[in-house]
Image (cartoon, grey):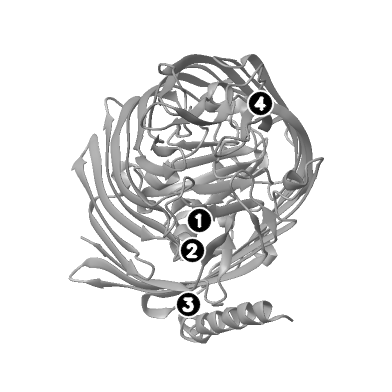
Amino acid sequence: MNDKQHTASGALGVALLLGGGLLSPVMARAEITESDFLNDVPVVLSASRLSQPVGEAPAAVTVIDQAMIRASGFRDIPDLFRLVPGFSVAYTRDNTWGVGYHGLADAFSRRMQVLIDGRSVYTAAFGEVPWSSLPLSIEDIERIEVVRGPNSATYGSNAFFGIISIITKDAAQVPGNHLSVQVGGQGMRGAMFRHGGGKDDLRYRLTVSDQRRDRFDSQMEKTATRHMDLRADYRLSPTDEISTTFALSRGDWRQGVVENEDFVDPVRRLDTGTEHFQLKFRRVLDPENEWSLQFYHARVRKEDDFVVPTPFGLVPVDYGYTQWREDIEFQMISRASERLRLVWGAEARWEGVKSPAYFYNKDARAGALYRLFGNAEWRPVPDWMIHAGALAEHHYLSGFDVSPRLAVNFLQSADHAFRASITQAYRSPTFFEAEGDLRFFTVNGNQVDRVFAPADGLQPERILSREVGYIGHVRPLRLQFDVRLFDDKVRRMMGSLDIGDDPGAVFPKLFQASNQHSVDIRGADVQLRWTPQRWLDLVMSYARVKIEAEEKDIAHSAPTHNFSALGIFKLADGWETSVGVYRVGAMYWLGDGDITKAFTRVDARLARRWKTAGHQMELALVGQNLGGRRYEEFRNDNLFGRRAYLSLMFDW
């Protein structure tokens, strides 16, 4: 055993002893009943837009519930995906996160469709998800459903490798006031206040938050992000309800490499902002039939301008942009017969970007896309279920595509289900990939460099995915597990092709997006949840991935082995402790990333809840990377060391 493994193992042992040593009081006092272990498997919505148990869904789904969110000790939403098999997560720098699934991972989440209450949050210009500026508090999340596999048949382009669907709490779920405060090492400060009010048919919740982070020692990564989120739910009649959300965030960020004022990444200040308005009307005709109409507007803004000295003179740089989206969607759910359920609908979207720097000498880039979708769930006999669905889409950059899916589920019993499916999905180019033109000029107007040029005939990426899966619930062992075997063939993968060489330029290469790669990805995902006693909840995941590609970097863009385990121990007198272990193999982060070494990270949380004067309180201590050995995140100089924070929560 090497030093790193020994250190990690020692930290894990200490954490487990901490949890296990406190268990005996609760073991002696708790009365365990059969109902504690025979809960149904989760019901999910995101795989097909139909409510269904995970064993009857046409795709593999991981559910991150509130117990897992709280026990993990994570305060940043992307960190939660460390609990999902096959996911790679890293804070990159420049206040962005890399979140990838089964490889091809870079500083953006461009191959995952990310939804918040049905609203897409990826940006049209770069395909990124602005994780650091989402106007959403982790305490307001009800659950997260992660569809592990292509799902364009349900949600269109960008649901290329899967779906991350974040569902927030209804206003009626959070009456009264909630205050939480965090303080810890590495500049961590946080405060969040929520008020839930209203009565009868009208309920609302208002959340305000201020979060501050200082990520790494070697770089300037200080962030201060504030947000406000207002949601109101109004029941118009026994059949009709309307929900509205208005949210905005503002960020005052510092980023760059300390003592490095060169052209690449000087220390600078950013001003960021996001906002959205969402309105949804829902009519429930009966338990099996309903329709809904949703509209939302979203806007993302960044101001990032500075001046860099070069051998050619002062060069003003402006990485700022404004992006926007308006979207309207109709959806109908109906039961056509006792054996057949249907969901169908249509969506229209207008989105664009304005950025003089990224799109030289061009006005705002904008376009409209249109979608028609339908999914059918047919049960010809009680033990078999057939899912068939497709989405037809016309995209402003890539034209017309159809994404079909066919899945068959064999329901051996209420506790055991087998699934086989085949699906095809697409990822449309972003505005920057298709039309980006990035140049730099001196203050006198002389061009000193051109680093990116518009593409020529760029086509959407395509994936053909085949999988088999098994969902099991072994009640005598109080064990639930999910196994997925997959074979994904990615064609026309977009990459940056060097099309020129200007020896006199600061950067002597000129890049252009092109469909230059074919990639085959095979492997297995496994996840399980074991609850042998009422006081113990163990969640584990493992993934093995093999990537075949001509380019070496792509072939190593996912760790071969990826493992996580989260143990939750419910103790006596309101005490709870949890231990998280995350083992990630070596991998290469595409784009601006590096080859990062394998690491094992151990986190632990110790908390106590109690009531005072009828009010609920909780005090928690969270330690992260307790092994002590710093590990690399995304880049070799992004070193994540041991850190801890205290959290205080108060409900009244």
Residue occupied by mark 3: 30
Q: Check disc 3 and give the amino acid type.
A: Ala
Q: Is residue 487 shown left or right of residue 366?
A: right
Of 521 and 588, the residue lying toward us: 588
Sequence-earlier tag: 2 or 1 = 2
> Where does label 2 land, which residue?
72
Lower position in the chain sequence, tag 4 or tag 1: 1
According to the picture, the residue beneath numbered tag 4 turns out to be 426
Asked if the residues shown at circle 4 and circle 1 are in contact, with their CB atoms under 8 angstroms apart, the answer is no
Circle 3 residues within 10 Å: few <14, some 14–19, many ≥20: few
In the rendered image, the vertical position of residue 74 relative to residue 45, given as above or below: below
Between tags 3 and 2, which lies in front? 2
**Front: mark 2 or 1:** 1
Give the vertical position of 483 relative to 644 (above or below).
above
Q: Nearer the viewer, mark 4 or mark 2?
A: 4
Q: Where residue 534 appears, x then y in whole percent?
A: 53, 70
Cα–Cα span, label 1 and label 3? 33 Å
Q: Are marks 2 and 1 in contact (CB under 8 Å)?
A: yes
Residue 329 located left or right of residue 102 = left
x, y (%) of residue 510? 62, 31
Of residues 622 and 88, which is closer to you in this image?
A: 88
Of mark 4 and mark 3, the one earlier in the sequence is 3
- Expressed as whole percent of the image width and height from the top left, the position of residue 124 reads 48, 27
